[in-house]
Image (cartoon, rainbow, N blue to C red):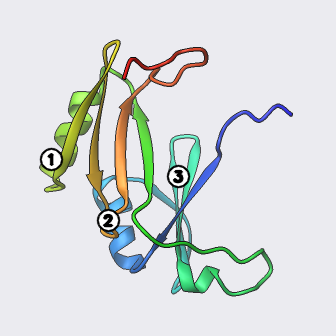
Amino acid sequence: MDIIKIKETCLYVSDLAKTKAFYNGLLKFEVIGEVPGRHVFFRVGSSVLLCFIAEASRKPGSLPPHFGSGELHLAFEVSKESYAATKATIETAGIPIEQEYDWGGGFLSFYFRDPDKHLLEVVMDGMWERGKKLES
C-alpha cells in the first residue's frame, strides 16, 4: 500500500455559521462545499477540512454514517518564514493563543481553539519529515 497523505480531516461542530465565520472569515480558508444544517467544507492548502453537524452526519444516507464529540485536535503547517506572521494574524484576529511550544531542532508550534473548543495547532514546515524524530 502506498498512501501519500491524509487528504481530508473531519471536525464535528455545533453551529455552521460560527464555524464558517471562523474558518473562512478569520482564517481565510476557501469554502468548497456547504449544505445548510449539515456541513461546510474548506480547502486548506492541498487538503480539505470537513465540518459536520454530528447529529446530521450520524443519520444513514448515501454515505456511511459518522459522528463524534469532544475537543479534537488538528495541526496546520506553515513555512518557517511565515510562522511569526501567521501567529500575529491569529493574535490580531482576537483569537487567544493557549501555548507556544519549542519542539527542538528549530521547530516551533502554537495552539489555539475554534468556536467548538477544538484544539488547533500551527506547526513549522519540516517538523514531521520522514525519518525525523522530535527531540521532545
Residue position marked by numbered label 1 in the rendering:
91
Q: Nearer the viewer, mark 3 or mark 2?
A: 2
Structural crowding at the residue carrying mark 2, measured as other residues with C-alpha within 10 Å and reported as few (<14), some (14–19) or many (≥20): few
The image's mark for residue 117 is 2
Q: Secondary structure at mark 1?
A: helix
Q: Left or right: 31 with respect to 58?
A: left
Q: Left or right: 115 with respect to 7?
A: left
Across and down, in percent, residue 108 comes to 29, 26
Residue at the (35%, 12%) spot, across then down: 105
Q: Nearer the viewer, mark 2 or mark 1?
A: 2
Residue 47 shows up from this direction: yes
Residue 38 shows up from this direction: no
How far apart marks 2 and 1 lie (CA) works out to 17 Å
Q: Secondary structure at mark 2?
A: loop
Q: Left or right: 101 with respect to 36?
A: left
Camera-nearest residue between 82 and 32: 82
Q: Is the Cβ of the residue at disc 2 closer than 8 Å to that at disc 1?
A: no
How far apart marks 3 and 1 lie (CA) works out to 22 Å
Q: As shown in the figure, which amino acid type bears the numbered disc 3?
A: Arg
Say which quarter of the image contains residue 88.
top left
Residue at the (30%, 20%) spot, across then down: 81
Camera-nearest residue between 39 and 3: 3
* Chain-order first, disc 3 or disc 2: 3
Across and down, in percent, residue 51 comes to 51, 67
Residue at the (60%, 18%) spot, across then down: 130
Say which quarter of the image contains residue 22.
bottom left
Residue position marked by numbered label 3 in the rendering:
43
